[in-house]
Amino acid sequence: MERGRALGINVAVAYIGLSTGPFIGGMMTHQWGWRSIFVLSLPIALVGFVLGWKNMTASQRSDEDKSFDLWGSVIYVAVLALSDRHDPRWLASFGMAVTGSCLFAFSLLHIGSTLLTIVVILMVMGSGFAFFVAPNNNAIVSSVGAEQYDLASGILATGRILGMSMSMAITTMILNIMSGSNAG
């Protein structure tokens, strides 16, 4: 259960950052210039370090000091429990099919599409991500022994960051080529 909870928190934080980061970064860039993004990185990194340090020492305490995370369990129990009880390949495949269908739905949007349509597609897509990410992460981390969980988690995070970085770079390149922009 502890691994499932940790993976759930990891996924939640990653996707909260992915969904809020571009908006907050755009606002900061508009207000204070692109360098302001780097100024914000240091306090966030320090908070992450302090919270990580605090949680590492808390995890070494006895079980009587630990409390039950009700809301975290409610949010993640469905997908994580399914991924522990069922073959994660099927859940992850279902999640990718839902996500792919939503991407196709986005390709059908036009200038007259409503905000509600976009919000519904994003909500369904979020569900697809949930069905993909948790079982996929669980399958990856479960493929190694307990003594190598840290290594598997690090490789997983590195792959995710490289994938996101490359997809943004490729998307930006394609948009610049298609728009004929010389800005860069």
Image: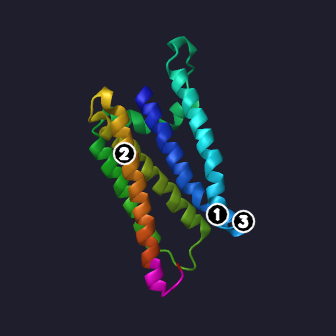
- Tag of residue 156: 2
Question: Residue 88 location in percent, x, y?
Answer: 30, 41
In space, the residues marked 3 and 1 are separated at their CA atoms by 8 Å
- Residue furthest to the right in view is 31
Quadrant containing the N terminus in the rendered view: top left
The residue pinned by badge 1 equals: 35
Q: Residue at x 47, y 44 (%)?
A: 11
Looking at the picture, does residue 35 appear above or below residue 47?
below
| Residues packed near mark 1 inside 10 Å, few (<14), some (14 to 19) or many (20 plus) | few
Closer to the eye: label 3 or 1: 1
Amino acid tagged 1:
Arg
Secondary structure under tag 2 reads helix
Looking at the picture, does residue 48 appear above or below residue 69?
below
Question: Residue 174 location in percent, x, y?
Answer: 42, 77
- Tag of residue 32: 3
Q: Is residue 182 left or right of residue 100?
A: right
Q: Quadrant of residue 168?
A: bottom left
Q: Residue at x 58, y 27 (%)?
A: 54
Residue 68 shown in magenta: no
